[in-house]
Image: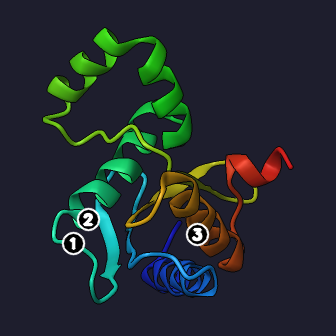
Amino acid sequence: MLKRDDAVTIIDAALHEGRARNLAPLAVAVLDPGGHLIAYQREDGAGIIRFDIAFGKAWGSLGMGFGSRELSRRAGTLPTFFTMLSATSGGRLVASPGGVLVRGRHREVLGAVGISGDLGDNDEACAIAGIVAAGFQTDETSQA
């Protein structure tokens, strides 16, 4: 189970990675497996819509069972399906890199992290850094 302290560790490490990379101000959302918010933090200067984007990246990853990078790839090849998904989810699904599943020791889904603020590739790198720093796995790190 992903606990609040784990979520805070993920957020702190993700934001630290963003500062180390000199990225734009980030917003980080950590969700449980049911898509409920555990913790959220936004840096000074991050726009007000960043919460919705970060949440949507994490929520969409949980809803579809894979990271938002893959959601983005599939949205490019199946636009009608993703228009339908967006409508069905009430617009909560965001298909852009930066949403990463948090996996436990046995590859079970413990939750997801969504980050918004910089380019999607950078958002995703910070999410992965935060998850790994907290001692969890991602689909991206298990393939490395």
Task: Compare residues 138 and 71 and report the one nearer the observer.
Answer: 71
At numbered mark 3, what does the secondary structure look like: helix, strand or loop? helix
Which numbered mark, 3 or 1, is in the foreground of this view?
A: 1
The residue singled out by tag 1 in the image is 47
Would you say residue 5 is visible in this rendering?
A: yes
| Left or right of 10 in this view: 52 | left
Q: Which mark is residue 62?
A: none
> Label 2 belongs to which residue?
50
Under tag 2, what secondary structure? helix
Q: Is residue 53 above or below residue 129?
A: above
Mark 2 to mark 3: distance in Å? Answer: 15 Å
Mark 3–mark 1 distance (CA, rounded to whole Å): 18 Å
Q: Earlier in the sequence, mark 3 or mark 1?
A: 1
- Residue 64's spot in the image, x, y percent? 44, 31
Report whether 137 appears left or right of 14.
Answer: right
Determine the image quadrant of residue 95: top left
Q: Position of residue 27 (x, y in %)?
A: 35, 73
Q: Position of residue 140 (x, y in %)?
A: 72, 49
What residue sits right under mark 3 in the picture? 126
Asked if residue 136 is positioned above or below residue 144 in the image, the reply reads below
Residue kind at label 3, given as amino acid type: Cys
Task: Give, as a three-letter code, the residue at label 1.
Answer: Gly
Mark 1 touches mark 2? (CB < 8 Å): yes
Residue 98 in view here = no
Which amino acid, mark 2?
Arg
Location of residue 120 in the rendering, given as x and y in whole percent from the top left corner: 49, 53
Q: Is residue 64 above or below residue 125?
A: above
Q: Secondary structure at mark 1?
A: loop
